Amino acid sequence: MIIITEQPLEPNILTDAVRDDTDGAVITFEGVTRNHNDGRGVEYLEYEAYRPMADEKLQELIDEIKDRWEIDKVAVAHRIGRVDIGELSLVIAVSAAHRRPAFEATLHFIDRLKEIVPIWKKEYFEGGEVWIGDPGSERTTA
Amino acid sequence: MKIAIKLFAGLRDRAGTGDLSVELPDGATVKDAIDTAQHNAPKEWTAPTSLMAAINNEFVEFNAALSDGDELALIPPVSGG
């Protein structure tokens, strides 16, 4: 299951999608918009995705972790558009017979997502905005 | 040949557009397309060193050859999650 949506994410949908009676472990990771970054207050985030490439790369990552770890099912959802403080930007659910491969695969998935999936995050902080990973894009309004 | 170029995030802001169409001679590469796009955009922009490129949704090197009708995406550092 791969979801890219402007709507608020619902972790239960992903958890239910990967749950199976053969699995003793379900890991659900939630990426949450926090109210500070780099020592300054964050007001909200805005995400954009290049589709369908983002969907295809997420599928590649699902295939990659299924190849490398003894896991069962994977579901991922990424929100785009405006995401307010405390709201979820990312949910990953992984099921497996045992917990260790599920944890390791989940961590790897997130690391790789931040390298190859064409999704970008713009941070609106107090007094300005910046595309994360692109410091030259910073603009201040103060 | 005609190439559709898409620019994203901070790169789109710098160039002043997210969509460009460029005419290139046969045999042109991704690098040629970038060089042309830097002058054709509403605002002249420079490519960050960490820029990545994708042709029709697959990552490619800058020396990759383009074909007529390709969609070339110029991908600044990604930051999902």
Image: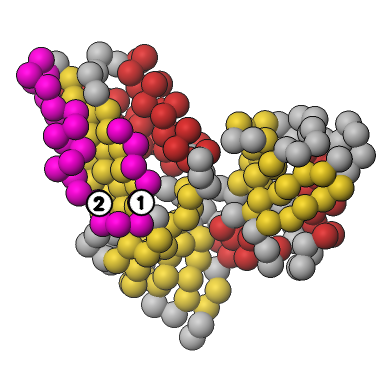
x then y, percent, for residue A84: 29, 66
Tell me, yes or no, whether the highlighted magenta stretch contains residue A15: yes
Image side of residue B19 versus residue A142, left or right: right
Residue type, label 2: Leu
Q: Specify start and end residues of the magenta stretch as a single range.
A: A1-27
Which residue is tagged 1?
A5
Quadrant in which residue B27 is drawn? top right
Of residue A137 and residue B64, the one placed in the foreground of this image is B64
Task: Please name the residue shown 65% across and 59% down the image.
Answer: B18
Q: Is residue A96 above or below residue A128?
A: above
- Residue found 71% across the figure and 31% down from its top: B61
In this figure, which residue is indicated by the disc labeled 2?
A: A9
Is A98 one of the magenta-colored residues? no
Secondary structure under badge 2?
Answer: loop
Is residue A110 left or right of A11 when viewed as pictured?
A: right
Mark 2 touching mark 1, by CB under 8 A?
yes
| Residue nearest the observer in this picture, A56 or A142 | A56
